[in-house]
Each structure stands twice: as structure tokens, then as C-alpha cells.
Image (spheres, rainbow, N blue to C red):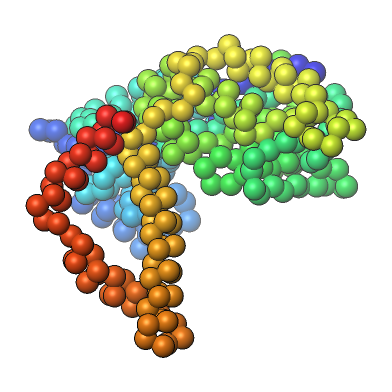
Amino acid sequence: MKLLLSGLDTVECAYYLRSGCISNLDFAALRERREAHRESKSRDPLVIELGGTEFMLLPNGTKSGYPFVISNQHCTIQFGEFNDPSFFVTYRSLALWHQGARALHEGFLSWAGSLGFVPVRPEGVSRCDFAFDFHLPTVDFDEDSFVTVAEKDSQHRKNGEVQTFTFGRDEVVLRVYNKSAEVEESSGKYWLHPLWQGQTENVWRVEWQVRKETLKRFGLRTFDALFDGYGDVLRYLVSEHTSLRVKSEDGNRSRWPVHSLWVMLAEHIDQLPAQGVYRELDARAQLDETLIRMAISMEGYLKKVAAIECLKEGRPMLSQGQTIDRLIPLLEKVHNGLTWRSDVQRRIDQLRIGA
């Protein structure tokens, strides 16, 4: 067993740019070229040059509202004259492994600058796929060997053998899969073979797909923050989200010994850049969580008010809305306008200071 390769396999990022004094991007002309190509019924893709770089211009915009999509081997760029964020970029696997995320990010900003765009606020990283490729001559684990907090999991088999284990969905997804087989059967990414130090078979990938909200919890909003501290989120994922274990007779699976693959992975992650952030404190999220807890309590009181009113009025049931209508006059009765401001301000101070 040997770690062959580690790095970013996909990165998605929103860029907040505006056109400067001089713009070299004519949106109207670009739209006309696209429409003319569509009407020509040509089967060939429309190749355009923007900022000294060639792209394929896709015939349609996106469901998320970007009118233009251009793509090449390095990235896919969604953009529009009036969109906010103005550009949404997906950096491709090939470019990330051969050039690196930093070079691609700086290259995009340079390209946008050549078109007359300048940043108005920092970029926002919205997805990162962290990949670790291992040579595994023997696969001695199955789906029951994983201990995870993920509620969703699935497997993909071929000829009776599991090729992919998947845990989680949406914000965090872990895939442990036979990358050698995937290259041969679907992706055709044979350019990975030289990066695997001569190995072409029995290469398994451990891949974490992490989206915006989880990245934000660890302060990974921009590329600079990502480069300085992506080890923080990976330490959390490898230790608390999902781990690979060696089965034993112990009924508590969390006490099973950690598999040597996971030990090797954790040791490698310990060497990655980190700031020691366990979770970034998000004051707004804390307030939202407090509001939810209060709403749960108030819902309980509403049910009791509904029960009392039903008994008083001799009726079988009241809806939530009907109950709120009956509660409002009660609140007006107990409301004290003289102390409202001072009492609210006192609670604001307590929440702000944390008392």
C-alpha cells in the first residue's frame, strides 16, 4: 500500500468583478455570434477567442441564470453582464493536476483583467474535491468497515465486486473507488498514469467533495484561505465524518481499530497546511440556531394555547394561524411600551458580548 498522489481534483469559485473604464468584452456581439452559429445549424462547436485565449462557446446559458458559458481544457466559465457574481468558474481536473489551483486562479484573474474587469470583492470558493490516490494490491474492506456520520450511502458493483463506496450527499460526499477501473471504463483520464509513479492497476481514490457551507465553517472562503488552511477541514473529515476500520468482535464499531489505509491518509493530512481552526465561529449562524430553538419552544406554547382555546370555545381544533390570531391580543395586553426598548437593548448587549 502506497500513497501515489494527492491534490485538488475539482474547484468551483464565484468571482465578483465589474467592467473597468475600458472593456474588451462586447456582450451584444457575443450574443449575436452565438445566435448566428445556432441558426446556421452547424454541428461544429463555435470556437471564439477572448482575452487571447480560445474557448468553445456553448449554445445556451445555464439554469442558474448565466447567459454565457465558455469552456476549454482548463476550465468552464459561466458569466453575464448583469449577474452577481459576474463569473462562476469550474476548474478542470487535468489543469488542476498539471498546473495547480493557485496558477489557475491567478491565470483567470489575469485573463479577466485583460478584458477590462477588476475585482470588487474577494472571490468565493464554493466547492473543492480533495483526492488521494493509493496503490492497494489487496482490498480487505467492505461497506460495513466504514464508520460514518453520513445518513446516505451507496455502492456500485461490477461483476459482483464493489468498485465504489459513497457516503453522504450535498455538502459533504466521500467516495472511495477503484480509480484504475474508472479510467479504463469511463473517464479515459490516461494522463493520470504517469502521475501514479508507474502504477496503472489497483489504484483506489479517496475523494472528499466539500461544498460552500462546510468550507465556510473552516474559514475557507477564498483561495488564499484555502491554500493556507485546507488541512483543517480534511482533519475533521478523516477523523469525525467517516473512518475506515478493521472489523472486530467488539459490538461498538467506533472502537474497531483504524485501518492502515486511514492511518496513512491521516498522517499525510497532518502534514498539509492548516491554521488549527476546528470550526470557524459564525455569529450569524449561532443567532439563527437560537431563533430555531426559540421557535420550537414557541410552537409548544402555541399548541397549549390552542388546547386552552378549544376547551373555552367548545370546538374540536384550531389551526396554527387561528391560534396566533388569538395570541396577539394577549401579547398586546402584557406589552409594556415603557420597558420594551431597555429590555430589548439589554438582550442585544447580552447576545453581542456573550453574557
Q: Residue 277 at x, y = what percent?
A: 46, 21
| Residue 20 against residue 335 in the figure, above or below | above
In the image, 297 versus 15, the foreground residue is: 297
Residue at image position (56%, 40%) is: 172
Q: Residue 235 at x, y = what percent?
A: 58, 23
Image quadrant in which the N terminus is located: top right
In the image, 162 versus 25, the foreground residue is: 162
Tell me where residue 202 sits by quadrant. Answer: top right
Q: Is residue 93 left or right of residue 253?
A: left
Q: Residue furthest top?
A: 271
Residue 310 in view, yes or no: yes
| Residue 329 against residue 267 in the figure, above or below | below
Residue at image position (28%, 75%) is: 325
Image quadrant in which the C terminus is located: top left
In the image, 323 versus 104, the foreground residue is: 323
Q: Residue 98 at x, y = what percent?
A: 53, 21
Q: Residue furthest bottom?
A: 314
Residue at image position (66%, 19%) is: 266
Q: Residue 59 at x, y = what percent?
A: 39, 55
| Residue 293 against residue 324 in the figure, above or below | above
Total of numbered circles in the picture?
Answer: 0
Tell me where residue 305 sits by quadrant. Answer: bottom left
